[in-house]
Image (cartoon, helix red, strand yellow):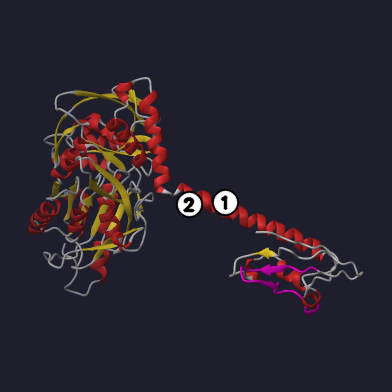
Amino acid sequence: MTFDVFLGHRLVFGVGSLRGETACPWQTKRDRQENGQGQLHHKSGFRSRKVRQPLRVAKNFRMSDCPIGLPMLARNMKHPIAAPLLACLLVFGVLSCVRAQDEQAAKDQNDNGYAQISIFAKAIQLIRQDYVDGKKTSYHDLITAALKGMLSSLDPHSQFMDPNDFRDMQDDTRSRFNGLGIEVWMKNGLPTVVTAMEDTPAAKAGILSGDQILKINGASTERMDLQDAINILRGPAGRNVTLTLLRPSTKEIKDYTLERTEIKVQSVKGARLLDAELTGPFQIAYIRLIQFNEPTAEELSKALDELQKQGMQALILDLRNNPGGLLNSAVDVCAQFLPPNTKVVSTQGRVASQQHDYSTSGARKERPPFPMALLINEGSASGAEIVSGALKDLHRAILVGETTFGKGSVQNVMQLPDGSAVRFTTAKYYTPSKQVIQGNGVTPNIRVPMTAEQERALFTFRNADNVKPDEEKNIIKTKDPQTLRAIDALKGVMIYAQQNAPRGEAVKK
């Protein structure tokens, strides 16, 4: 690309191609006549040198590609400063084009797979050749470490799993494993408790949702991979694990020494009619969902059948500290309360194959549209957020409590030839009203916060054996404001329905 620029009263900007040269589109007729032999004549009679090498540009050159103001200046060349300014703009435009080309070339190089893999291979070669400890430089160890770093750099939910980790992950959906009973995710760079499952060592010790794990057996978790942390928490039953936890709400740091045990997750617990002293003339039932596993929907259906036989008029479904589980299980739970073929949640990703709508099945047991309230808190995540988001958006239930965890992304797990696997995020969940769950959570209709003292008391109550009805009633009255508020909300709905229903269709007392 070459330039011949003449600064004078007029400017001729030659535009050439491989076949020949053409005058610039903004030349005047006189300019073209004067430049007929490739020469430029100044007004004073000065004869300039020939234009031996005009500017060569792309054949698809457009005026719109010129720097700002260039076409306008070209049409007004008689202005005293037009030519110098045009020259400056030309230089500026050329430099901008060159810079853009350099940036594009660098971008192309950065996204060149072969070039980047060759850099990676060279780094491995240098490490294997010169690193001081040869025991740490096997290809397997180096590649495994690189894969872990690559996946964990994407987001907190993406990870590389060796064959043992992959088998452990498959056990999660079978409702039985050895560990402490803690569901954890990475949050703010630290393993953070999503929930402590009921009837587990963690729950009985008083560990709460939101507690941050600073150390495991004295080792800092600041740079620990999530899967490495999970591997330490799980393991052979009967062995102790010491956790150093920070509770953000109180800034308290405390050590917990827990013994691993076999964790058996029961999906549905506590199904019963609440005490009449709490509910008044209405029959309000209560069910707690611990997790979304394969049998959850079936267990819930049986519990609802039994409660309906007992005269249930309204339901409180407790999803507090429910960490989620299987997507299909969450959709099947929604099917207990929604009409057939109702869209519950959708996923949207970068590729078309990740665009899905998930709806309730066409066949379900017919149930009356009894009023519902859902209890949620920061420990409600994933599947619990799908259920609460759907029932809220579709106006099927009132949400009471606090904003949920905000774990609403889809991870695909793909097994590799050696039995290891990669899990990475491929899409995000959207509620029926197109609200994004990931990072936002689901907000309640009625916000009711709980103090740390109330949460501890509720945990203790839930994990106690042989609780008497009077003790339960007292705990709800004094330590569980969220359940109390849900009872009041449902009573209000039923009283309103009684007063506004046609005679003979009022809610039964």
**Where is residue 35 drawn, in percent x and y?**
78, 73
Element marked by disc 1 = helix
> Dot 2: within a 10 Å radius of its alpha carbon, few (fewer than 14), some, or many (20 or more) residues?
few
- Residue 14 part of the magenta segment: yes
Q: Which residues are magenta?
A: 11-30
Q: Is residue 84 magenta?
A: no
* Image point (28%, 22%), residue name: 217
Question: Looking at numbered disc 2 in the image, what kind of residue is underneath it?
Answer: Asp
Q: Is residue 453 visible?
A: no
Q: In screen coordinates, is 94 left or right of 462?
A: right
Q: Residues within 10 Å of mark 1 (few under 14, many from 20)?
A: few
Tell me if 22 is positioned left or right of 186 in this view. right
Provide residue 141's location: percent of width, then percent of height. Answer: 29, 30
Quadrant including the N terminus = bottom right
Occupied quadrant, residue 77: bottom right
Find out whether the residues at labels 1 and 2 contact each other: C-beta distance under 8 Å: no
Indicate the secondary structure of the residue bearing disc 2.
Answer: helix
Q: Residue furthest top?
A: 132
Q: Is residue 12 above or below residue 268?
A: below
Give x and y (percent) for residue 342. 23, 67
Q: Which residue is mark 1?
A: 102
Q: Which residue is mark 2?
A: 108
Mark before the other along the chain sequence, 1 or 2: 1
Q: Nearer the viewer, residue 420 or 86?
A: 86
Q: Which residue lies most toward the bottom here?
A: 29
